[in-house]
Amino acid sequence: VLDIRKVYAESDHFTFDPGFTSTASCESKITYIDGDAGILLHRGYPIDQLAEHSSFLEVCHLLLNGELPTAEEFAKFEHNITYHTMLHAQFDAFFQGFRRDAHPMAVMTGAVGALSAFYADSINVDDAREREISAHRLIAKMPTIAARAYKYTVGQPFVSPRNDLSYSENFLRMCFAVPAEDWKPNPVLTRAMDRIFILHADHEQNASTSTVRLAGSSGAHPFACIAAGIACLWGPSHGGANQEALEMLETIGSVDNIKDYVQGVKDRKYKLMGFGHRVYKNFDPRAKVMQKTAHEVLAELGHNNDPLLQVAQELEKVALSDPYFIERKLYPNIDFYSGITLRAMGFPTNMFTVLFALARTVGWISQWKEMFEDPSRKIGRPRQLYTGATQRDYVPVEKR
Ligand code: ACO
């Protein structure tokens, strides 16, 4: 009879690592994180410098191709992206299949998966040129899909992309203008949108990126792999936390209620959303930029006295001086301030994770592309520690 425990004991190469806290699944040159020091670098460049001086599209070029583009390279890249912003006319009909009150993440997961049916020509994943076109198509079409997911759920007509606008201007226009309207977003909000996209662009082997790599390792269609990543991102422990963080601030409602709420966290009734991170055991460097962006947006819109901002600032102060959070190294993460900013910009809470997915698409597809550039690539196949019954004989139903 097979003794399963003996099999494990005799195995030379077996690691049990639930949640992959100490197992690297790949080599990567894209993003470096030092969680203890609160450092995040993309291709070597610190995130705060990119957020301050770069644009989202330039960061897309950096992540995908390894270098910041020259002016000429950037013009070519921008042309390639704007060339692909449209969706096939048949795609509009596809949106109509969703319930009108569908969560836009459900619409986005379905829509991006369905996009694979429109681009059957880009499935030769071993061809570098086809991989590049798939990446450009995804980066280009994601804002169009995200804006339509929003317009559909609020019952407004779709607004077509405008290729003379910047990436973020075009996205805000598709969300907040009506068709054919001569509408231009506020430049401070456009810059904030671009910065939020930069802050969310990549974060090495998080759950959704690992999902994209794992799905892609079988050679599956890249758009279907990105749909898998979107599904993973939706969860409240990952990208869904930005929606939950804002809802938590709304639940707290006033600085007077913070003490009781924090006690509830310490009594383990609920978690403090927007706090804690698997890798950062120090300030999330993105949270600092996000906090500054929140202040800029609220000042521009005249919302400086937004009660939720006051709740957030006080809650941060209380948590950072409480031994429960200090001992566990729980600091605000990027989601803590992003909700307040996005809400002030006019996005409903259920769009927050959609915006995250839009921005993270470049990280997902850059990681997917890097995986195929590695000649030693293998299908991802985690092991398991079997804890079920040992081998036994089948018992006919009348004898059970
Ligand atoms: N509030 C209260 N306590 C917390 C929190 C929190 N947000 N996060 C962790 N803890 C506590 C845990 O209860 C645990 O305490 P214990 O040791 O006494 O049992 C300890 O801190 C360690 O927590 P783990 O769950 O082991 O940490 P892990 O690395 O697995 O989890 C995670 C990280 C999922 C991000 C967690 O901190 C969390 O759920 N945070 C809230 C959700 C959130 O903001 N997610 C966004 C992450 S960033 C992103 O995806 C962009």
Image (tube, rainbow, N blue to C red):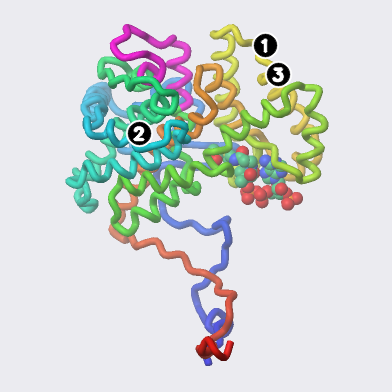
User: x, y (%) of residue 227?
Assistant: 38, 45
Disc 3 crowd rating (10 Å Cα; few below 14, some 14-19, many 20+) is some
Q: Amino acid at mark 3?
A: Gln
Residue sitting at x 57%, y 32%: 243
In the rendered image of this protein, does residue 218 appear above or below residue 196?
below
Disc 2 is placed on an element classified as helix
For ligand 1, tell me if the residue under mark 1 lies within 8 Å.
no
Ligand 1 visible in quadrant:
top right
Q: Earlier in the sequence, mark 2 or mark 1?
A: 2
- Residue 305, disc: 1
Q: CA distance from mark 2 to mark 1?
A: 38 Å
Q: Which residue is disc 3 drawn over?
A: 310
Q: Nearer the viewer, residue 373 or 109?
A: 109
Residue furthest out toward the bottom: 1
Q: Nearer the viewer, residue 343 or 291?
A: 343
Q: Is residue 269 on the magenta stretch? A: no
**Whether residue 138 is situated above or below residue 308 in the rendered picture:** below
Q: Quadrant of residue 130?
A: top left
Residue matched to label 2? 62
Q: Give the prevailing secondary structure in the magenta stretch.
A: helix
